[in-house]
Image (tube, rainbow, N blue to C red):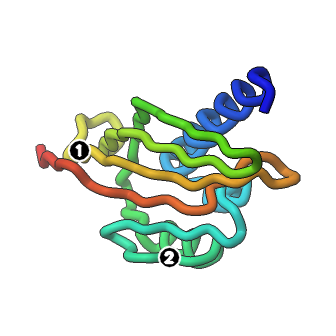
Amino acid sequence: MPTDTLITDRIEIADLLTRFALLLDEKRWDDADTVLAEDVTVHSPRGGELNGLDKVVGFMRQDEVDGDHTQHTTTDLLVDVDDDQATASANSTVYYYRDGRAPHFTGGLRQRYATTRTPAGWRIREVWINPVWTRES
C-alpha cells in the first residue's frame, strides 16, 4: 500500500473515532450510520454484546438519562491498516455532567475497534469498551 494512501486511511480512521465520540456526546442517534457499520457489534459492560445498528442505537436511546450529558476525550490512538480493514485502540476519558455543573462522574476507558472501508467511507464494525477506572464526585 502506498504511503500516502496509508496516511490518508489512518487520518480518516482517527476522524471516524472522533466523530463517534461526538455522536455520543451530542446524542445524534439518527446519524449512527455515518460512523457504525450496519452489522456493527458492540461489547460493553453496560450493554453486554449488542449486534446490529438498530440494536446499538436502541440501547443508546434507552440508556439516556434526562439532564445528563457526556464529554468524551480520546487519546493515544493506534491504527493498523490492512487494505480495507483496520484495527485501532485508544484511551478515552468520559465526563458525565449536568448543564453548567462540574462532572459528577468520570470514567477512564480502554477501547479497541475493528473498522472496515465501505463505499461511504470507513465505518466501525466492532468495538470493545473496557472500563479502567471510575470516580464519583
Most extreme residue toward the right is: 119
**What residue sits right under mark 2 in the picture?**
50
Location of residue 8 (image quadrant): top right
Q: Amino acid at mark 1?
A: Thr
**30 versus 97 height, above or below:** below
Q: Give the residue displayed 50% in from the left and 76% down from the top.
A: 50
Q: Indicate the secondary structure of the residue bearing disc 1.
A: strand
- Residue 59: percent from left, percent from top: 49, 73
Which of the pair 93/26 is nearer the observer? 93
**93 versus 113 height, above or below:** above
**What residue sits right under mark 1 in the picture?**
106
Around disc 2, counting alpha carbons within 10 Å, would you say few (fewer than 14), some (14 to 19), or many (20 or more)?
Answer: some
Which of the pair 58/119 is nearer the observer? 119
**How many numbered tags mark residues here?**
2
Q: Amino acid at mark 2?
A: Leu
**31 versus 16 height, above or below:** below
Q: Is residue 12 left or right of residue 119?
A: left
- Residue 72: percent from left, percent from top: 41, 40
Residue 127 at least partly seen: yes
Q: Indicate the secondary structure of the residue bearing disc 2.
A: strand
